[in-house]
Image (tube, grey):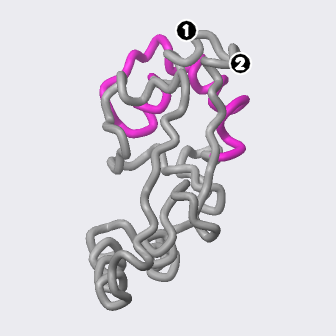
């Protein structure tokens, strides 16, 4: 994964969980659904993510959320919450939200596992390269 022009180009070509053999894939556990975390723990984690992102948060839950984050989330999102690109784990400290930056969208009882289609064979190679350049220029790249 990652935000290089080549990585963005690859993602546009083959998608994410698209069914294509070259598609990107990542997995977030269904911690709430599987009973790995209680609703209260997930709530505290969401408050910690809001804290990370500089959003309004409940300071009484941030400490507990931080402990849980260290135990459950740093393996993919890193100690500082900036994400580990190679694993497809997003940066939780910026304002780039796939599903929205409000608490209701951050609370993850069961992951969404969205899909991005593969555009190879659907768009011509020049258009795909143009889209990759545009995404990179709009802030999706490094």
Q: For residue 91: magenta?
A: no
Q: Is residue 52 magenta?
A: yes
Image point (37%, 45%), residue name: 98
Q: Position of residue 35 (x, y in %)?
A: 69, 14
Which numbered mark, 2 or 1, is in the foreground of this view? 2
Which element is circle 1 on?
helix
Front-most of 9 and 21?
Answer: 21
Is residue 20 placed above or below 74 in the rendered structure? below
In the rendered image, the vertical position of residue 33 relative to residue 86, given as above or below:
above
Residue under numbered circle 2:
36
Residue at position x 53%, y 21% from top? 109
Q: Which numbered disc covers residue 9? A: none
Find residue 79 and report its horizontal and vertical position in percent.
64, 44
Instruction: Give the position of the N terminus as an image quadrant.
Output: bottom right
CB under 8 Å between discs 2 and 1: no
Q: Residue at x 51, y 58 (%)?
A: 18
Structural distance between the alpha carbons of marks 2 and 1: 12 Å
Magenta residues? Answer: 47-76
Q: Residue 55's x, y, as percent?
A: 32, 32
For the C terminus, the quadrant is bottom left
| Image x and y of residue 48, in percent | 49, 27
Q: Quadrant of residue 45?
A: top right
Q: Could one spot residue 128 in this view of the protein?
A: yes
Task: Kindly identify the residue that appears in the image at 48 percent across and 35 percent down.
Answer: 112
Query: Circle 1 sits on which residue?
Result: 40
Q: Secondary structure at mark 2?
A: loop
Q: Evaluate whether residue 142 shows in this view.
A: no
Q: Residue furthest bottom?
A: 126
Q: Residues within 10 Å of mark 1 (few under 14, many from 20)?
A: few
Circle 2 packing at 10 Å, graded few (<14), some (14-19), many (20+), is some
Give the overall secondary structure of the magenta segment.
helix
């Amino acid at each position: 994964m990652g935000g290089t022009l080549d990585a963005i180009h690859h993602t546009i070509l083959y998608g994410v969980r698209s069914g294509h053999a070259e598609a990107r894939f990542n997995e977030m556990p269904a911690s709430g659904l599987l009973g790995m975390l209680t609703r209260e723990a997930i709530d505290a984690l969401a408050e910690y993510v809001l804290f990370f992102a500089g959003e309004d948060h409940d300071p009484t839950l941030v400490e507990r959320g931080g402990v849980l984050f260290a135990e459950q989330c740093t393996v993919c999102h890193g100690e500082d919450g900036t994400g580990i690109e190679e694993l497809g784990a997003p940066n939780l400290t910026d304002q780039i939200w796939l599903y929205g930056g409000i608490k209701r969208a951050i609370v993850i009882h069961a992951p969404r596992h969205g899909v991005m289609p593969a555009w190879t064979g659907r768009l011509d190679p020049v258009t795909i390269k143009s889209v990759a350049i545009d995404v990179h220029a709009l802030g999706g790249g490094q």
